[in-house]
Image (cartoon, rainbow, N blue to C red):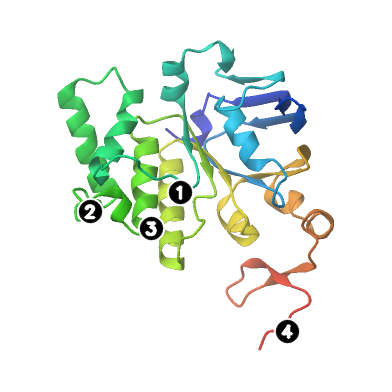
């Protein structure tokens, strides 16, 4: 499916989230619209509400006001099965509390695909082993794997039922440069196959390189959504991230953000 045929816009309208007996406000009147396949970033300083927003989109947090719609329908009216089939969540800090091997962890994702029979599920697992290069680690206990290996396994689990939308919360966190590159390459491949990926990232240069749109949030409020270069302008970066950066063109003609207060040899 190409980007031009993507018909499953995800629309967030005036979303509020309050939690606890003190009604702590995590999100405040946020409206967003994601209208095509590809990678879309959510950025902001720590504590701005990025994770809360992802969790609310998949209803791990229940909104206290507002609406989330997809395919023209309010997803709060969907069954849990329908939500799981359409929207997958790749969270942070996941461990297995059972002695499961890597392939068993991936297989858990197929709970969201009850329409597949046993043979079709085995075929899908074989596809995932190939796609995510899991041959050498499939039988290893999940909790004994490296961070990069776990990241591959968890991503494979998240997309095993072929969701339309993947919500990825800092999937590069804790990965070395090699596995960061592998993760981003895999996510880009999923986007080319027609998936929408909404990703929380702290590395603004990776956002510039890989994402087609960006939403900046701060203190639970939306500051701006749009093209990455428009959202991540120098004024916004200084005001909301509290750092001085500037844009620079590399020898290869790429535009990157660099530290204005640091000298480079």
Q: Residues within 10 Å of mark 1 (few under 14, many from 20)?
A: some
User: Mark 1 = which residue?
Assistant: 188
Indicate which label's residue lies in the foreground, 3 or 4.
3
Alpha carbons under labels 4 and 2: distance apart: 43 Å
Q: Which mark is residue 20?
A: none
Residue bearing mark 2: 137
> Closer to the observer: label 1 or label 3?
3
Q: Is residue 231 left or right of residue 177?
A: right
Q: Earlier in the sequence, mark 3 or mark 2?
A: 2
- Judging depth in this view, the residue of 115 and 136 nearest the camera is 136
Indicate which disc, 4 or 2, sits on the residue closer to the N terminus: 2
Q: In the figure, is residue 181 to the left or right of 137?
A: right
Specify few, some or many for label 2: CA neighbours under 10 Å numbering under 14, 14-19, or 20 or more: some
Residue drawn 63% across and 74% down? 250
> For the residue labelled by badge 4, is the local secondary structure a helix, a strand or a loop?
loop
Residue 85 at x, y percent in the picture: 41, 23
Quadrant of the rendered structure where residue 114 is?
Answer: top left
Circle nearer the N terminus (1, 4): 1
Residue under pointer 3 = 148
Residue ranking furthest to the bottom: 265
Q: Nearer the viewer, mark 1 or mark 2?
A: 2
- At numbered mark 1, what does the secondary structure look like: helix, strand or loop? helix
């Amino acid at each position: 499916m190409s980007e031009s045929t993507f018909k499953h816009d995800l629309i967030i309208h005036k979303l509020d989230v309050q939690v606890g007996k003190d009604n702590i406000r995590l999100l405040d009147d946020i409206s967003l619209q994601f209208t095509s396949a590809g990678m879309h970033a959510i950025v902001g300083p720590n504590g701005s509400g990025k994770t809360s927003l992802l969790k609310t989109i998949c209803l791990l947090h229940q909104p206290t006001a507002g609406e989330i719609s997809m395919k023209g329908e309010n997803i709060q009216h969907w069954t849990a099965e329908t939500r799981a089939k359409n929207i997958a969540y790749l969270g942070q800090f996941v461990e297995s509390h059972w002695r499961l091997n890597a392939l068993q962890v991936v297989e858990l994702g197929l709970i969201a695909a009850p329409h597949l029979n046993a043979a079709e599920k085995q075929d899908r697992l074989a596809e995932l082993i190939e796609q995510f290069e899991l041959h050498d680690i499939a039988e290893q206990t999940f909790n004994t794997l490296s961070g990069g290996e776990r990241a591959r396994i968890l991503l494979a689990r998240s997309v095993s039922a072929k969701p339309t939308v993947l919500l990825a919360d800092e999937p590069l966190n804790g990965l070395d440069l090699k596995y960061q590159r592998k993760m981003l390459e895999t996510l880009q491949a999923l986007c080319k196959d027609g998936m929408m990926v909404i990703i929380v990232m702290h590395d603004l240069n990776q956002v510039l390189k890989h994402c087609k749109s960006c939403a900046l949030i701060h203190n639970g409020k939306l500051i701006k959504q749009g093209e990455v270069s428009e959202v991540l302008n120098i004024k916004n970066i200084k005001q909301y991230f509290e750092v001085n950066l500037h844009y620079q063109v590399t020898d290869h003609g790429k535009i990157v953000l660099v530290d204005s207060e640091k000298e480079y040899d």
